[in-house]
Image (cartoon, grey):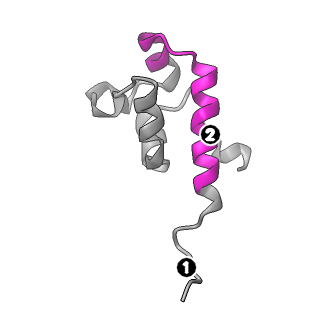
Amino acid sequence: MTEDNKITKDMTFGEVLGKYPQTVKTFFEYGMHCFGCHIAVSETIEQGASAHGVAVDQLIEDLNKIASSAAEVDPQKPSKTK
């Protein structure tokens, strides 16, 4: 994963979920259901984490693990199974 593709705490929920929809589960695990909130389009991950009492650095680390593993699997390439 390149620096350009990393999730940062200044990204909005909308940006992260639009680019990495598989991160929904991680947000749920942290008790953050922000993607259903109308504020999610403009609220940053840091702001949401602060409002929910979540350690933002750990959240970002976990989100990037999920995003990185998804980046390794290119959904555009067909499976080579027969």
Q: In the picture, residue 6 is in which quadrant?
A: top right
Question: Which label sits in the foreground, 1 or 2?
Answer: 1
Disc 2 target residue: 64
Whether residue 9 is visible to the viewer of this picture, yes or no, is: no
Residue 40 rendering spot, x and y as whole percentages? 35, 29
Amino acid on which the number 1 mark rests in the picture: Ser
- Main secondary-structure element of the magenta-colored stretch: helix
Q: Does the segment drawn in magenta span residue 71?
A: no
Q: Residue at x 42, y 40 (%)?
A: 24
Which one is nearer the viewer's eye here, 67 or 3?
67
Q: Earlier in the sequence, mark 1 or mark 2?
A: 2
In space, the residues marked 1 and 2 are separated at their CA atoms by: 25 Å
Instruction: State the extent of the magenta-drawn residues as a range.
Output: 47-70
Rendered location of residue 36, percent (x, y): 28, 33
Q: Is residue 66 left or right of residue 26?
A: right
Q: Secondary structure at mark 2?
A: helix
Residue assigned mark 1: 79
